[in-house]
Image: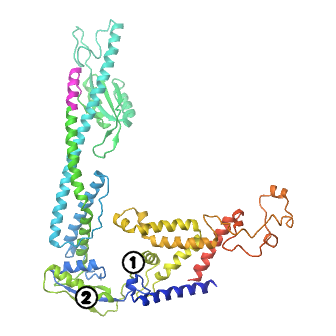
Amino acid sequence: YCSTAVLIFRLLDFGLLRLTKRAMNISERDVGISFRSEEMTRIQMFLQNDSAYACVSEFGELGLVQFSDLNENVNEFQRKYINEVRRCDEMERKLRYIEKECRKCINQSPPDSGENPETPMPSEMFNLELTFEKLENELKEVNSNKETLMKNKLELTELKHILRKTQTFFDEAQLTLGQTSRSEESMSTSLLSAEAPIGSSSGDSQQSPKFGFIAGVIARERVPSFERMLWRACRGNVFLRQTEIETPLEDPVTGEEVSKCVFIIFFQGEQLKTKVRKICEGYKATMYPCPESQAERREMSMGVMTRIEDIQTVLSQTAEHQTRLLSNAARSIRVWFRKVKKIKAVYHTLNLCNTQKAIIAEGWCPSSELDRVNLAARRGTERSGTDIPAIINTMATRRTPPTYHRTNKFTNGFQAIVDAYGVADYREINPAPFTLITFPFLFAVMFGDCGHGSIMFLFALWMVINEKKFLAEKSTNEMWLMLFGGRYIILLMGLFSVYTGLLYNDCFSKSLNIFGSSWSLAETREKMNVTMETLRTTSTIQLNPAVTFQTGSPYPIGIDPIWNISKNQIVFLNSYKMKLSIILGVAQM
């Protein structure tokens, strides 16, 4: 029964499509689907050196010629147009750099207008190279200046925090020393004197020890090990004070926020000073000069603040200039990418040709499109401005032609599914027309839920209605591109799932009890010897169809709603759907 139904379904599908095409007097090319691959013809093209570029570019715009490699024994790096291909690679590198800067600085991908420009002539290639090189050099110069300014700003900001924090350290030290001097009259010298700077001697007859200090900034995560290393290397003969900077600082290279701490180390003697400096350099701590007197520190702090304001003004102007450059480039970068890719494709194709005397190319094209190929060759000749036309001859060959199937936006997804399993041989029957119906229908037989199918159908319908807008956006999200590419497949799968869901009486995994169940336990409880006590104590009761099936006929549409309360509901329904889909799938093979 299943085999007969599938065979009739296929014949009707095939016959209706044929009758429709004959009634409308249209060809398979217009329908966008073919039951066999196109008939192909081997062609040989004699092109002039001056018009070869323009002719190949016209063939590329047409998209109906597959060129054969006539230089199989020639190394890629020894072919005639390899230098032009390398120039195109260099232009693509520059464009990728500009695109990366656009995303980094203006926080958005360059817009795509959908414009498909003509293939630029070789004379325009030089102008494009100059434009890209000039733009790249300007951006590199701006980025270099900006990075230098950011480094200067970071250094000044760290110095500002050092001057502020060390002033707090000195104030605390002076307060502590003042209290100590009043309590211990015998002490004649102090580590830090309020009247004299650090390192100077007092006016007393007894010479006080000279203490020095080093101030700097270090990353917060390195402070514990830095402190331990100082203690062990200097044997406790140094005094370290450190405090964290409240606001994180921006790294000028990576742009990430970094938490740092200000430190000041007191020591005595040149040997300890050398040792402390080496430890600071090993931990990548930045050391800054810090005046000893309070007046000098205040004066330096004011100068630092003024320089920070000046650098911030220059940074704002640099950022504005950079934004203007990138905004202007972002408007054209997609068009530039297409132009460069077309130029590269033309020169790559010319490398496949025999270029010893004249440019000779061979390839395949559909037999029905020979007139369009000849017309494209004439357009290329006129575009190049030469008087000698290109000559295109057909060749008799025993080589196996390539397989070419015509598709459109509706059939392209189905053809891609078939080709994923294997491309048909030349002029072999194409399974894709049959999968237009069988693939989504077999999915629906297995899926079978009108609720979830409605969601699929509406989602696919939304993509189909707005397909022009989505095509213009040129998204790069792989997941979205996969869904959008199969929008017509999802549309049919959702539509058929609604149909099979109604046949299964399944909506969001629940049956619709419209006509009432054909099973009844209330009226037949005595015949089955089921008491109220049995219902309270037993978790499951197996119904006897001979007793509990009352109406004499099954539920009108789909599965009876009583299966919703059965213990094996999911196992039964899933098994039923899967087995039915397997039976239909094997039957239609």
Pick out the residue farthest to the top.
Answer: 185
In the figure, is residue 41 to the left or right of 427?
left
What count of labels does the image hold? 2
- State the residue position of label 2: 44
In the figure, is residue 531 to the left or right of 141?
right
Picture residue at 66% right of the left edge, 73% below the top: 557
- Which quadrant is home to the C terminus? bottom right
Hey, which quadrant is residue 580 in on the image?
Answer: bottom right
Compared to residue 312, the image places residue 542 above or below, namely below
Picture residue at 17% right of the left edge, 84% below the top: 358
- Which quadrant is home to the N terminus? bottom right
- State the residue position of label 1: 408
Identify which residue, 472 or 318, lies in the foreground: 472
Say if the magenta span includes residue 298. yes
- In percent of width and height, residue 180 lies at 35, 11
- Any mark on residue 139, and which? none
Compared to residue 303, the image places residue 154 above or below, namely below
Predominant SS of the magenta segment: helix
The stretch in magenta equals 290-305
- In percent of width and height, residue 125 lies at 17, 69
